[in-house]
Image (cartoon, helix red, strand yellow):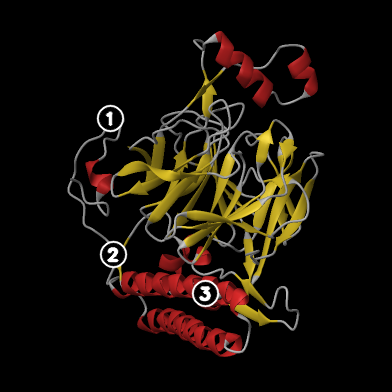
Amino acid sequence: MLCSYHISEHMTIQVKHSLKRMRLVTHTPDPYTKRRILLEINQLKQKANEDILMIVKYTNGLIVNLQKYSVKHILQLRSFIRCCNTVVRGISEISEIPSKDFYNPLERALMMDSIEDLISKLRGPKLDFSSVKVDFLSYTLPTFPHALFNYSYFSGGFNSKREITITPLERTITNTDINWGGRFLSVGPNIILYTGGKSNFRFCCLINIETKEKTIMPEMQNGRRWHAMTWIHGHPAVIGGSSKSKALDKRIESILSNAYCESLDEKNNNKATKYKILTSVEVLINNRWVVYPSVNIGRSNATAVCNHKNVYVIGGNNPKRVEAIEKFIGTSWKILKIKLPLPADSIGVLCTGNDLLLVGGQVRYNIAVDKSFYYDTKCKNFLVADCIEDKCHFFQNNWCIEGNKIRGLRIRSSGEVQEVQISYRLKI
């Protein structure tokens, strides 16, 4: 068995290289910053405990058939407290941070960078006691710990084949090397890592969204488009996607052509390119793409998200919509027993405590939905959430968190790119 923390040292790098002795460079976390983050988390946990007492006190005089609301929310608050405890233990154990190319939001904050911005994005659950008897209590989901492990300063998406829109900064990025078949991941408050795409499947670059400066990075070992991006073991990662292939089964080729053609003209003229669905995973470590364990099910247009030490891959096509959810555990991917209630691709996914919020998605080519679901990872079930009012899907799973406000860029069924604010409320 391999240790997950040093998995990169056990993975094969498929390039020619020579071994040389290197001095390990580490960073010491700033004590004040560490105390500040732990204090904020403990305050969130204390508030959750106080909310439990408030729920019990508030519901004592209500009729029995309404108690299911309080019981469910108490369970959610206790789950949130467990999440706080887990993250607190993880942060407390950090004594040094290895020097590397990219740092996740928590690591960057511990090295004294934008601590107040990060703190402002950590919000616990919010209770709203209403006088309406039918729905006497609303529960706003926490944004913690999403912003600790996923940069949440801005949201971006392609508004055309070669132009990225950034919100709320109201900026656009146009470059001949990028296109909407590629995917990008926020790796800093104003930096995105762009990978893959239509023209050069192996292409990789960094883009500063303020200066629009582009820095070419090493190419991926496996070219891809329509893939997912997230953080694995504290490093940027690409998962799955599609690549060109000359040897596809004709039946699958036909389905893929219908699912992925980029315009009606291309579809009607039968000019859609042949693609192969990928299972491969690569992680960018020390300026090199390292091959990691593959997912069990190949998928394109899937969504990946990092929640502390857990990484999830959700939805996608292969070539039909995939209902299976995979979780990276230790050094391998495991298919969870629970299935998506509505198989789709391009789902928006956010971390809320130990659980996940799934928003929108595409159930067929250019057919999006207005459904959203709350995945309870402890009870292993889905609840219907009330988050969006319009049908939409999300090719880029990146979000802007401002307090309890969540903003993203969605693609409507009409093809229009539009900013959307996610409501973190549940229907029970």
Q: Vertical placement of 1 versus 317: above or below?
A: below
Which residue corresponds to the image point at 68% horizontal and 47% vertical from the top-left? 157
Q: Vertical placement of 281 versus 223: above or below?
A: below
The amino acid marked with disc number 2 is Thr
The residue that label 3 is drawn on is 71
Q: Position of residue 370 (x, y in %)?
A: 73, 49
Disc 3 to disc 2: CB gap under 8 Å: no
Q: Label 1 to label 2, Cα distance in Å?
A: 26 Å
Image check: 412 left or right of 250? right
The amino acid marked with disc number 3 is Val
Give residue 98's mark: none
Nearest-to-viewer mark from 1 and 3: 3
Rate crowding at label 2 as few (under 14), some (14 to 19) or many (20 or more) other CA atoms within 10 Å.
Answer: few
Give residue 16's mark: 1
Q: Which of 357 and 134 is in front in this view?
A: 134
Rate crowding at label 3 as few (under 14), some (14 to 19) or many (20 or more) other CA atoms within 10 Å.
Answer: some
Q: Can residue 169 be seen by looking at this rendering?
A: yes
Tell me the quarter of the image containing the C terminus. Answer: bottom right
The amino acid marked with disc number 1 is Lys
Count of picture labels? 3
Q: Which of 220 and 331 is in front in this view?
A: 331
Disc 1 to disc 3: CB gap under 8 Å: no
Which residue corresponds to the image point at 31% horizontal and 75% vertical from the top-left? 92
Q: Which of marks 1 and 2 is nearer the N terminus?
A: 1
Tell me the quarter of the image containing the N terminus. Answer: top left
The residue that label 2 is drawn on is 26
Q: Label 3 to label 2, Cα distance in Å?
A: 46 Å
